[in-house]
């Protein structure tokens, strides 16, 4: 949210938060804002993990057509899905209204700073000019190395190997919570590297975070990413993309009492 808000401000625009529920972005609420563009992660919404429902996808495309608006689709972790088939991109439904963003920051490494944009032809020149002015272009050698990596088939093999590894870490997280904090419900697990834990209603977010930190376990509260930073309902975002299986198991065991009995 902070990065989108900052980018909008730099462009002389104002970012307006829109509610997200279990079916994805609330298109009626979006329409009521009068916005001319929307930025969203429909395949695996950050940070709730929900998938944009089919009827919401159609409503969103209809909204863009009626408003002559632009949809910016950030497909940041589409390569890593576990319990379901890959979700189709919005860009394929309305290529004249959707700007699709992709990146290797999740599949390879953030330090590569490589990504891509599939945009409507009418916006291509404007986007290319903005890119040129912002950083004079991405590193050429890095792009060539990535192209060779993809063409050789090694990128696909890497994705298969890492998909299995992340799926294993995900299983460890699910089993550890079932063993040590069975009352905690997890959502957002269909893809990516994080899950959302729903905690008892009387959980004090900051107190739990501080208590966990004193045990050398770092937790993230959902309030960090809410537009209004509301403390409720109490939820934790558990990331396992940069945490090994043993560390996940040990970390949950260390804080199990904080998750099940926050007081």
Image: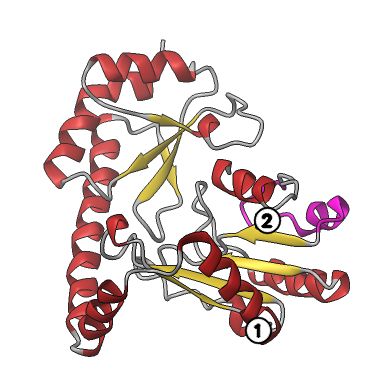
Q: Is residue 122 left or right of residue 102?
A: right
Residue receiving disc 2: 25
Q: Answer above or below: position of 244 versus 112.
A: above
Q: Quadrant of residue 66?
A: bottom right
Q: Position of residue 75 (x, y in %)?
A: 49, 67
Q: Residue at x 16, y 46 (%)?
A: 244
Residue situated furthest top in the rendering: 263
Quadrant holding the N terminus: top right
Pick the front one: 14 or 97? 14
Disc nearer the start of the sequence (1/2)? 2
Q: Answer above or below: position of 8 versus 247.
A: below
Q: Residue at x 73, y 69 (%)?
A: 70
Q: Position of residue 122 (x, y in %)?
A: 71, 84
Q: Is residue 30 inside the magenta stretch?
A: yes
Q: Is residue 84 inside the magenta stretch?
A: no
Q: Position of residue 189 (x, y in %)?
A: 40, 54
Q: Secondary structure at mark 2?
A: strand
Q: Position of residue 220 (x, y in %)?
A: 40, 31
Residue situated furthest left in the rendering: 246
Q: Quadrant of residue 146?
A: bottom left
**Quick one: label 1, few (<14), some, or many (20+) residues within 10 Å?**
some
Residue situated furthest bottom in the rendering: 151
Q: Residue at x 20, y 39 (%)?
A: 248
Q: Is residue 206 visible?
A: yes
Foreground disc of the pair 1, 2: 1
Pick the front one: 3 or 44? 3
Q: Answer above or below: position of 261 versus 28.
A: above
Residue receiving disc 1: 95
Task: Tell me the CA gap for discs 1 and 2.
Answer: 20 Å
Q: Which residues are magenta?
A: 18-35
């Amino acid at each position: 949210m902070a990065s989108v808000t900052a980018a909008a401000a730099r462009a002389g625009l104002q970012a307006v938060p829109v509610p997200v529920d279990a079916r994805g972005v609330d298109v009626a609420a979006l329409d009521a804002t009068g916005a001319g563009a929307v930025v969203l992660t429909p395949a695996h919404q950050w940070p709730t993990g929900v998938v944009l429902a089919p009827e919401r996808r159609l409503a969103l495309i209809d909204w863009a057509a009626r408003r002559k608006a632009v949809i910016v689709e950030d497909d940041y972790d589409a390569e890593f899905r576990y319990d379901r088939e890959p979700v189709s991109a919005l860009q394929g439904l309305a290529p004249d209204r959707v700007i699709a963003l992709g990146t290797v920051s999740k599949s390879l490494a953030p330090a590569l700073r490589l990504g891509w944009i599939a945009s409507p032809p009418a916006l291509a020149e404007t986007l290319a000019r903005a890119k040129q002015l912002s950083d004079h272009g991405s590193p050429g050698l890095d792009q060539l190395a990535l192209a060779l990596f993809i063409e050789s088939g090694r990128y696909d093999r890497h994705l298969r190997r890492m998909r299995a590894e992340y799926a294993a870490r995900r299983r460890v997280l699910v089993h550890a919570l079932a063993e040590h904090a069975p009352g905690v419900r997890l959502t957002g697990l269909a893809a990516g590297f994080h899950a959302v834990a729903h905690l008892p209603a009387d959980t004090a977010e900051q107190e739990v975070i501080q208590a966990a930190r004193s045990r050398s376990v770092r937790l993230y509260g959902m309030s960090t990413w809410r537009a209004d930073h509301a403390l409720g309902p109490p939820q934790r975002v558990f990331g396992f993309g940069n945490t090994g299986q043993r560390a996940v198991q040990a970390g949950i065991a260390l804080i199990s009492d904080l998750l099940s009995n926050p007081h």
